[in-house]
Structure formats: structure tokens, C-alpha cells
Image (spheres, rainbow, N blue to C red):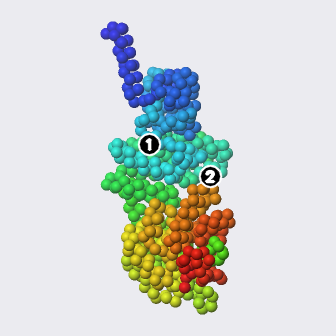
Amino acid sequence: MSTSEKMNDLRDDKERFVAFSFAAADLLIELDQSGVICFVSGAAKGITGKDIKELMGMKFEDVLDPIDRRVITYLLQNMSEGERISPVGARMANTNVSSIVGACSLPRTHGHIYLTINVTGLPAAQSLSVNRDGETGLLDKNDFVKLANDQLSLASETGQELELTLLHLDNIRDMAANTTEQGMDEFLDKMGGILRSYSFGGDSAGRIDGDKYGVLHSKSFDGKILQDKVENLSDEVSPGHGITVSPSSIDLDKGQLSSENASNALMFVVNSFVNTEDKIFSIQNLADGLQGRMENTMNRISTLKSVFQKHQFKLVYQPIVGLLDEKIHHHEVLCRFKDGESPYETVTFAEEVGIILDLDLAVVKKALDYLKTFKPKGEDTPNLAVNISGHSMENDPFIDSLNVLLDQNKDVSGHMGIEITETSQINDLVRSDRIIQNFRQKGIHVSLDDMGAGAASFQYIRALTTDFVKIDGAYVRDVLNNDRDQAILRCMARLCMDLKIGTIAEMVETREQATLLKQAGVDYGQGWLFSKPVDEIISPKVKRTVSVNARRKGFKTGWG
């Protein structure tokens, strides 16, 4: 072959490689051995915000968003001749364009690196809305789990196999005690870059607790490499005081699990890792995670049922106050559990697993017992309102048990009211209204909770005849600064006035809110302005007369 022919072949090969590159990328960049841009071709202005002339001679790291800069810089600095990196998500500094960066270092190119930048390839994980840890630049726990779920679905569709490596930095507190603040900042910053650089898509790593981290990566990558990288980095930053890392790898093969079960299992795995004190984490795959979640759920159900049945919880009472006269009309009964467990989370869990019926009956029984304590003292018996879930309202055996309980305690049941929560769970409105009217005939006042919280609120008011509705606190919280909320409040108050239904506003915290609510026509308020929940009702000012506002509206507001 002649020299001319060889030159033509070389030119053809070069053009062919350039064509292949443009087929896969929107922008091509070549870096010299110092990381300076020495060649640019493609949509430079649209992606980076700078034209080709401006980019020439710049450090490539200066084109990137600071959070992504550390990852790309780490990868490029650690590339060997003939090596390529998997595509990594990155955002541009001047345009916030999310892109995918690929790179390779070809033999005999004197350390030059060739980059492909694409704004359309694999989905970039970066988003302006994600929450990041300020010290490492990694995703926080919730966004890490959300991203991991998304990447898990993507990998399943594309046939990729993923693994989750969890890292516990065992003695990082000792390292911090023997390292300067600047040294620790440097360690956390560089560690964040390392974890991201080895993660799937370049941003599938998160700080899921103070000294615990998670990295989602290809199954072909040995997660234990991360242990060595982090330990070596700590030794460099703090010689003699480096940390030890306990890694655990979890196979994320979904197998026969549904997407929902796989998601639940992943959340259980991460939460279990956060809560475990052991250096060795025993869960090895999603199936184990799902099994663990099921066992954990069943154990919790059993424990909570016992707590409910044995009444091992406490009741507190928050007053509902007339906005015209500021006299207490009745108290809402609220639950408090041992060990600081969140009442909202506990009640939500009980609803989800179907044991809310046990709690609702237990609260009614305990509240009736509390009402009976006032008669021997010769004190006025207060009026109470207990929460009954929409789940419970849908259950015939529960309604039967509740009626028996009320009939057995007729001496005080006239001082009991019912507040229906989770109305979105009520499907048979005709049946529910029949039950509500039966309660009202017994002298049990009924309230409908969270009016305005859902699109079907007015449907419930139309179908269910109740004594009161509680206006969702979301409308009250910003009522002073939101004209739309004020208008909606006035409309709701007017509607209830025409229907002869009393209105109770939740989350009233300031005098200005109370005044505006009163002017809008709302009857009662509940919130910290009047009182936080109290352990005991010491000397109840029970209002047994019909208020001026009630006479105007034509409905009865007192129990008894």
C-alpha cells in the first residue's frame, strides 16, 4: 500500500471515529495533560453557555457546577492510559444543563483525554430540587432512596444488574477529634467525590446518616474497593488517625418481586442499616429485605395491638373555644404513646395495616372512663370529642362494638362526640350517613375533620349530615397573608352557616388569626393561642347554653 493510500485510510479512520462520536454525543472536548481544553466541536454555547473560542484554553473543571466538579476531576485525575469511564451525570456551571459526560484516554496521546458530553443520553440524576448533604455533596437519605428506586426500575428495563454497598465509618468521631476542621472538610469533600465517581450514573450515592453512606453501583464492580479508597483517603488526610470502614453489599435483583415490594424492601434495608449498631449487616438481597420488612411489620402489629388492648397509652385534651366568647365548648381527645413514638406515624401505621379499629375502640373506652371520674367529685363533666377513622366507619363489627360501648355508658355518653378523620376512606356515603344519624339520635355530636383538605370535601358535606366541620389548618396557617385563603374560609363558613353546621378552625396560633376567623363567620377555634393539649381537665368551663351565633344559625351547640 502506498504512502498516499495509508494517509487516506488514516483520514478515513479519523473521520469515521469523529462520526461515531457525534452519533453518540452533542459536544466533543479534548483536554491536554493539564486538564485544559484544547479542542471543542459541537453545541458548545447551548450546553456550556460559552462559545468554542471562549472554551479554548479553559480548565474543563471550570465549566462544571461546583458540586459535580469534584467527581469529574477525581475521575479524570485517576484515569490510566487506555482507560475509559462509565457515563457520569454532571451539570454545567453557567447553564444548569444536566448532561452525561463520558471520557477515555487513548494510548500514545501524551495524556490527552477525550470527552463526550450529551444532554439526552442516560437520565442525569442531578436536579435542582434534590436535597444534598452540605459536607459531602451527596444526596440525603430520602432523595437517595428515591433515586435508587428510579435507577432500579431503569436498570430492570435495560437488563443492567445493580448492587447497593452500604458503608459504616466506624471511628470517624475519633478521626474528627484528632484532625483539624479543615482536614475533616477536605476528607468529607473528597470522599463524596469518590463515592459518586463509582456510583451508577455518577450520582447514585448518599449520606443516609451521620457516619453511614450508600452507593448504588454496577454488580460487576467490587464494592469493597470503596472501603479501601475511603480508608486510604482518611490515612492521607489524618496520618495515624484514619478510619476503618465496614462495608455491606446487597444484591438488588428484584427477582419475582413487584416494583412496589422491591421499593418497600429497599426502604426497609436502608432504615435497618441506619438503625443497626452491628458492624456486620445481615441483609444480603431485596428478598431478605422484604422478608425482614414483613417480619418487622408483623411484630409491630402484634406489639401495637397489645398496647391498644391494654390501654398502654395516654390521653391528652385540647380545648375547642368559641371565637365570640372564648369559652371552652369541648375538648378533642388526642393519643400519646410511650418512648416518644410519633402519634401521627403510629395512627397512620395502624390505619395502613388495619388495626386502627382496636385503637379507636380503646380510645373511646378510656375517654368514657375518664368522663366518669368527674361525677364523684361533683364537678361539671366536660364534653369530649374522640377521633374515629374513616377506616373504622367502614367496618360493621366496629360500629356494632362502638354502639354497645356507648349504650353501656349512657350516664356519660351524652358528653361524648365523634370526630371522623380520614374521610377519603369512606366509600359508602349512604351507609355512613345512616350510622351518623344513629349516633346523633343518641345525643352523640359528630364532626367532620379536615374540610377543604381534599377535592371530595364538599361531596362529604353534601352526603353526611353532621353537627360540625373542622376547617383544615392549612387554610388558617397563612390566612393573614393569603387573600385566596381568606376568600375560601369565608365561603366555607357561609356554606356551613346556610347548612346549619358549626365550624371549627384548626391551628389557630395568633390573636390576629382568631380575629380574622371570627370576622369570616367561623364559630370555634382550636390551637396554641388558646391552649396546648393538657394532661388533665382541671376545672372545665362547660358551655351548656346555645350561643348567640348558634341562635342566629339555628343549630344546637351544647352537649346534653
Position of residue 270 relative to residue 338, above or below, is: above
**Circle 2: is it few (<14), some (14-19), or many (20+) Cα within 10 Å?**
few
Residue at 34% x, 10% y is 5
Q: Quadrant of residue 547?
A: bottom right
Q: Earlier in the sequence, mark 2 or mark 1?
A: 2
Mark 2: which amino acid?
A: Asp
Mark 1: which amino acid?
A: Phe
Where is the N terminus found, in terms of image quarters? Answer: top left
Dot 2 and dot 1 residues touching (CB under 8 Å)? no
Foreground tag (2 vs 1): 1
From the top left corner, tell me how far across and down residue 521 is, in percent: 59, 68
Position of residue 111 relative to residue 470, above or below, is: above
Residue 200's disc is 1
Residue bearing mark 2: 174
Position of residue 331 relative to residue 219, above or below, is: below
What secondary structure is marked by label 2?
Answer: helix
Q: Nearer the viewer, residue 66 or 206?
A: 66
